[in-house]
Structures are given as C-alpha cells and as structure tokens.
Amino acid sequence: ESFVEKWASVVEEYAVRYGNKISGWWFDGCYNEKCVFKFNYSDRLLRRYYDACRKGNPEAAVAFNNGIRPGFEKNFIDEDYIAGEYTDFNIYPENGKFVDGALCHILAPLGLSSDGNQFHAWGEPGCKISKENLAKYIKTLTDIGAAVTVEIALNFDSTFDPDQLDALRYVKSVVRKDKQSTNNC
C-alpha cells in the first residue's frame, strides 16, 4: 500500500504538471490474483493511480496491464481501455469494441524472436506477420472502433527497423486509401 501511495503521488505530480497534454496512461505490472505474479493489486489500490491520472486531465484514458490474457478482458473496474498485451496479432473482440465499458485495445510486438519464443519478440527487428496481413488485422479492429498499438524495435542509434517501418507505412497507406474511398461514396 505504501508503494502505491508513493507512486501515485509521482503520477499525480506529472498529471497535474502536464494537464491535458497527457491523454492516456498505460500501467504495466498491475498483477492481481488472476496472474502468476501475485502482487495483489486490487480495484481499491488501482483507484489511487486512476484518480492521480485524472487530476490533470479528467478525460485521460487509463489502462492497467495484468499480463497476457486469453482474450479481451477488463481487469480492473476503472479501466477506460483494455491494456491488451498480447504476443501476436490474432485476437479479435467478440462483442464489438467495448468489454464492460472499456475500449478494446491490443499491444503486440511486430518483431521476430531470435529463439522462437513468442515472449522474446519485444524490441526485436523483423516482422512476424506480413504487411498485408498486418494491414488487414488493423483495419478489421479499427473498423469496429477498437485500438491497436504495434511495438517495434528501436536501434541503439535511435533509428527504427526498416522492415517494420515499411510494414507500418504500408498499413498507413491501406487505411488512408480505404478512408478516402469511403468518404467518396
């Protein structure tokens, strides 16, 4: 509890200092009894973080990551969007863009694991999925209003993996082209 109070005061200081310049918060490691790592976070404890985030911007969206789940699952009562940590781009919302009032969101790495372990793809170069399939996946989710975050590799010289950038540029062109054709109807 002391840990939460201390970190909530840090979050609150940032939230108040930057106000509406911060529109979203994503907390990692908020494990509860549903997870193998039992840190015993509860709705009561996470409420302190939630309130701290909202002090500077009452409209800020907040998510608490409770590890990789089998589907879109709201883990805490105060989440505005699903933290959505997954290892691949193959999970789909079953009932639209919301789960218990929280927006469906996925965060997954695009990189290829060098040892074949899907959990080791974070921060790795390369693309585990073709740019065409990535575009199709992202379009499917965004068409229903869900959100997608693609994690890519950052090199030591502050550049991004060229294959991943190419894939993301392709996704952008597909989504833009589709938006333009929809607006022309």
Image (cartoon, helix red, strand yellow):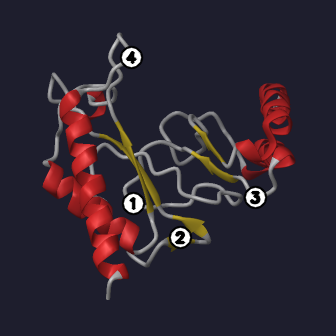
Indicate whether 126 appears above or below 41.
above
Examine the image and state in which quarter residue 173 appears.
Answer: bottom left
Mark 1 vs 2, N-terminal side: 1
Marks 2 and 1: in contact by CB < 8 Å? no
Mark 3 vs 1, N-terminal side: 3
Name the residue that disc number 4 marks. Answer: 158
The residue under label 1 is which amino acid type?
A: Gly
Query: Mark 3 or mark 1, which is nearer to you?
Result: 3
Residue 99: give its label.
2
Marks 1 and 3: in contact by CB < 8 Å? no
Q: Residues within 10 Å of mark 1 (few under 14, many from 20)?
A: some
* Label 3, label 1: how far apart the Cα atoms are: 26 Å
Q: Secondary structure at mark 4?
A: loop
Instruction: Tell me if residue 92 can be seen.
Output: no
The residue under label 2 is which amino acid type?
A: Val
* Label 1, label 2: how far apart the Cα atoms are: 10 Å
The residue under label 3 is which amino acid type?
A: Glu
Instruction: Tell me if residue 125 can be seen.
Output: yes
